[in-house]
Image (tube, rainbow, N blue to C red):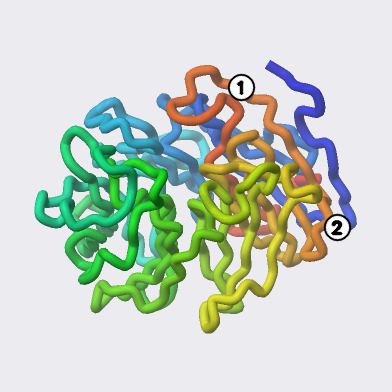
Amino acid sequence: MLYENDGVSIFDKSKASSGYTIFWPLGTETVMLMDMSGNIAHSWEMGGLPGNYAYLLPNGNLLAAIRTDEHVLGLSAKGGHMVEMDWDGNIVWEHTDHFQHHDFRRLDNGNTCYVRWALMPEDLAAKVPGGMAGAEHEDGIYGDEVIEIDVDGNVVWEWSFATDIEDNSKYPICPIEHRKEWAHANTICPVDGGDYLISFRQNHLIARIDRETKQFTWEMCDWKLGHQHDVQKLESGNILVYANGAHGPYHGPNEGSRIFEIDPATNETVWEYSGSPAYTFDSPFISGCQVMPNDNVLICEGRSGRLFEVTREGEIVWNFNSPYVAPNAPYAPGRSIFRCYRYAADSAEIAGRLGDPS
């Protein structure tokens, strides 16, 4: 189904960062690689629904998670089956964990990390603060774990929010959220030293996990993040995050979402983007962002299926409204896209496979 202004509606060739954009519309079984004009240059048929996105590895292969039908807990953004596919769609690696959800990454050493649900012990679940009273899962409360596996699927490192963090009283669940999970990890981003940046939606919390101590060495727990997604570390050392705005101070009528760049030394915002007017940029769930080689920022406004690129001055220099509508998306409206990435034509992911994306 096509909507007015579907496809690429803005493309300033002199200011946009040229490349191929990869995305996987929720509710479809096709991962797409799109040029700057909105043409699909390459695609992969996945044989299942997204769980929840896909991205390219430096060897040109695709890493993705597919939603499985086992152990559906009624919690959003389930995956379950992670696959690596070559350019022609052949599976060259796979791993199944039916409790895997949201995010996964391939590490430089060839290992793979991901987040998963694990039912919390009753005594620890009873101590979880916040949320709506009586709104637990029928099983109790599910906690988040980070798992790192080798190429054969052996667990080489693991971390649990429920058992490794010593004081959970500091991180209450948002008072108007359910208590089914603590705390809805939606991003796991590898950083230097084997540490991880992680985002917990239910608590408006982003943090850095120390690999050795398994404690947070940096954190920001702030309602202004508004159930954020896609936290990442920039080359400058600053933190970039998609602040959805839901249930936060900015999410009154017509307040919208924001992109924040944060100095972790002070937790001060050093750059931000919002819509003009604010309500023109608004996705209260999913979504993501990526800094381009020219320092522009590519944004996935997930709910609406809108992908766009802005300069640091806030000018929109490329805009794409997804025409791909799927009525059976598992947890979001049919045009929604969880996350996207862009790769330059001369990048390791693309070079020699496709030509000029303009």
Q: Which residue is mark 2?
A: 15
Residue 175: percent from left, percent from top: 39, 49
In this rendered view, identify the residue nearer to me: 216 or 220: 220
Q: Quadrant of residue 344?
A: bottom right
User: Quadrant location of the C terminus?
Assistant: top right
Front-most of residues 315 and 13: 315
Using the image, tell me which numbered label, if any, was put on residue 253. Answer: none
Residue 328 on image: x %, y %: 48, 19
Left of 9 or right of it: where is 74?
left
Classify 155 as above or below 85.
below
Looking at the image, residue 137 lies above or below residue 191: above
> What is the x, y in percent for residue 123?
10, 54
Residue at 76% from the left image edge and 45% from the top image edge: 357
Task: Give residue 337's position: percent from left, percent from top.
Answer: 57, 37
Q: Nearer the viewer, mark 2 or mark 1?
A: 1
For the point 70% across and 58% down, the residue is: 297
CA distance for labels 2 and 1: 30 Å
Provide the secondary structure element on which disc 2 rests.
loop
Q: Note whether 97 is above or below 317 in the view shown.
A: above
Which residue is disc 1 drawn over? 325
